Image (cartoon, rainbow, N blue to C red):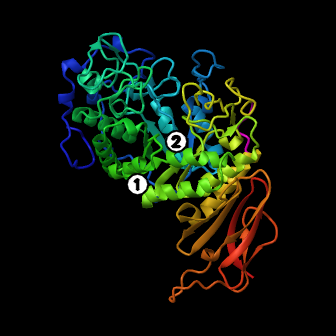
């Protein structure tokens, strides 16, 4: 049986039952580079037993205090030995970024203020899959980005710098590991799985059987719920049958094995929207029990649900996920942050999400760009827009995720704010080379992109420093105080935790803006009488800008107010200070 470190709540399979002759194709069917020696070909060659002399890195107390830095391994940093496939200036080629390269840049990430690095998938892919999302061997590190020892060393060095590591796991689908018997990839409905031509070129061997794949053809209508649930991803990424209990148990073993082998602190589950929900729930429970047995009592499981329905995304928390990508707010708020909608859109979007998520809103993954969407800053836009967007990202409720290069002002040549599509795809232009020798660049990303003295690096660093020093900014609830109703301009919200209250004010307008804001909620906690008792002659101190304090006053016996003025694309973070 599995030699696990927890007592499972449901029966786990005997490995022998997963290794019948029908499940064991020959190695000649595996396309692409060979895995490194020692990578398990079968679950029978792997173990989940905890070593008595190995100590695993403990989990953080609260992931809300962390800051994720997300990177594409192939595009971040290349260190010898560098393996390039195709033309290095072609965005669809492999450019040579690798795990050793990431290790050399951990100091840069920590200096910025990142406390957790999110890696794109490291499992062995076939030719042409530089991004890692087309796995062929789910238990081997792709030799073109390094070895298992390189990954272990990266995790160890990250822990030494106070950085956690979150690994992207692709368990929804494999790469093009088989062809259909009729030669067609067309969606064929859900009545009967299609036949497969020849052997299935996947490892571990236990997965190399048609029963572990849905076999319904490729999705051609993303609004069709059956296709969304059971279809292969275009062009030919074959969906694993996560509704099959036997497949589930194999994938659970694989997920736990990566934790045991690498000491990672969390996983990102790609495409949970397309997985069987029972599988997601079982996987979350199994992984977290296993990690706890290793001493990781708060192991993080992030779900990537790329829909924009807050209620559907929020329902993923009930499956046991610790955090989910907040795509709904990203889609809605991007318009206002780009100056194409009123500031009220920011406040209304927050309130909509807060109602859908409830207390789980605190554990959503916030972002302004990532490897699947356009970079925030577009060619021709004023750089100040990114200044405001970074403040909104870092100071709002939720766990911020920075995308590599955004802290250096990387841009993208698109004017599109609607979701990306085939006519105007986000990638590969949003996956530029970060390393100085990279050839797939734009004017915004060419040369040394690890400049810790650049304007946006210092701005991001400053915001992250504020977030870390003030519990209200990483643990606190959020309340919208004001948003410009009919144009870009002032958006103000309160973050509060225990007795600390912080006022954040953003100006999304390209010129100065002033507003009289209600600020009574900033002051003393409620007295026994239920009333707030502000100090005598209170003022607000802006933590981001030198200058005179802002006086707080009452108008005709009404509520406490403050007159706030911000420059174009200005940001204010205010604390109370009695005079």
Q: How many marks?
A: 2
Q: Is residue 112 left or right of residue 60?
A: right
Q: Is residue 12 magenta?
A: no
The residue at the point 51 percent across, 33 percent down is 150
Q: Residues within 10 Å of mark 1 (few under 14, many from 20)?
A: some
Q: Is residue 245 left or right of residue 352?
A: left
180, above or below 287, in the image? above
Q: Position of residue 64 (x, y in %)?
A: 50, 57
Q: Is residue 292 left or right of residue 24?
A: right
Q: Are marks 2 and 1 in contact (CB under 8 Å)?
A: no
Front residue of 365 and 296: 365
SS class, disc 1:
loop
**Which mark, residue 298?**
1
The residue at the point 74 percent across, 41 percent down is 451
523, above or below 442, in the image? below
Q: Is residue 361 left or right of residue 464?
A: left
Quadrant of the rendering where the N terminus is positioned: top left
**Which mark, residue 118?**
2
Task: State which tag comes first along the sequence, 2 or 1.
Answer: 2
The residue at the point 67 percent across, 45 percent down is 340
Q: Position of residue 24 (x, y in %)?
A: 25, 18
Front residue of 250 and 504: 504
In three-dimensional space, the C-alpha distance between marks 2 and 1, rounded to whole angstroms, equals 17 Å
Q: Which residues are magenta?
A: 447-453
Which residue in the rendered view is the most extreme toward the right?
A: 547
């Amino acid at each position: 049986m599995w030699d696990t470190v927890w007592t499972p709540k449901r029966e786990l399979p005997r490995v022998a039952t997963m290794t019948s002759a029908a499940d064991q194709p020959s190695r000649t069917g595996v396309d692409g580079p060979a895995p490194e020696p020692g990578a398990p070909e079968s679950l029978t060659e792997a173990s989940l037993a905890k070593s008595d002399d190995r100590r695993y890195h403990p989990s953080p107390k609260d992931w809300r205090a962390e800051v994720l830095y997300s990177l594409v391994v192939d595009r971040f940093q290349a260190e010898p030995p560098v393996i390039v496939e195709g033309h290095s200036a072609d965005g669809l080629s492999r450019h040579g970024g690798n795990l050793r390269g990431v290790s050399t840049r951990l100091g840069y990430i920590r200096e910025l203020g990142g406390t957790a690095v999110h890696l794109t998938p490291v499992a062995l892919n076939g030719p042409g899959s530089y991004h890692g999302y087309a796995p062929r061997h789910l238990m081997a590190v792709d030799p073109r980005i390094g070895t298992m020892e390189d990954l272990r060393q990266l995790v160890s060095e990250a822990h030494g710098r106070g950085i956690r590591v979150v690994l992207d796991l692709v368990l929804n689908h494999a790469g093009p590991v088989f062809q259909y018997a009729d030669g067609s990839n067309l969606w064929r409905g859900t009545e009967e799985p299609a036949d497969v031509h020849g052997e299935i070129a996947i490892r571990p061997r236990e997965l190399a059987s048609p029963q572990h794949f849905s076999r319904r053809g490729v999705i051609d209508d993303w609004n069709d719920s059956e296709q969304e649930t059971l279809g292969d991803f275009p062009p030919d990424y074959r969906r694993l049958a996560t509704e099959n209990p036997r497949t589930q148990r194999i994938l659970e073993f694989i997920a736990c094995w990566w934790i045991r082998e690498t000491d990672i602190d969390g996983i990102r589950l790609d495409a949970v929207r397309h997985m069987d929900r029972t599988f997601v729930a079982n996987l979350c429970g199994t992984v977290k029990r296993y990690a706890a047995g290793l001493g990781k009592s708060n192991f993080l499981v992030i779900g990537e649900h790329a829909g924009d329905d807050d209620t559907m995304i929020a329902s993923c928390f009930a499956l046991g996920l610790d955090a989910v990508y907040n795509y709904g707010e990203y889609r809605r708020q991007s318009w206002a942050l780009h100056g194409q909608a009123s500031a009220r859109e920011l406040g209304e979007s927050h309130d909509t999400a807060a109602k859908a998520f409830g207390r789980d809103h605190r554990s959503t993954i916030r972002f302004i760009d990532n490897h699947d969407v356009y970079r925030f800053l577009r060619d021709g836009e004023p750089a100040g827009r990114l200044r405001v967007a970074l403040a909104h990202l870092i100071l709002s409720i939720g766990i911020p995720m920075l995308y590599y290069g955004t802290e250096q002002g990387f841009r993208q040549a698109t004017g599109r704010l609607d979701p990306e599509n085939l006519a105007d795809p986000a990638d590969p232009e949003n996956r530029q080379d970060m390393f100085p020798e990279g050839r797939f660049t734009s004017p915004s990303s060419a040369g040394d992109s690890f400049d810790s003295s650049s304007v946006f690096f210092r701005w991001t660093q400053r915001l992250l420093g504020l977030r870390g020093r003030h519990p209200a900014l990483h643990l606190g609830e959020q309340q919208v105080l004001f948003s410009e109703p009919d144009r870009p301009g002032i958006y103000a919200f309160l973050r509060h935790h225990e007795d600390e209250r912080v006022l954040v004010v953003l100006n999304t307008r390209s010129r100065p803006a002033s507003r009289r804001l209600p600020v009574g909620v900033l002051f003393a906690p409620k007295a026994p009488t239920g009333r707030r008792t502000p100090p005598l002659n209170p003022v607000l101190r802006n933590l981001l800008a030198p200058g005179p304090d802002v006086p707080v006053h009452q108008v005709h016996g009404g509520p406490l107010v403050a007159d706030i003025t911000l420059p174009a694309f200005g940001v204010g973070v205010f604390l109370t200070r009695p005079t």
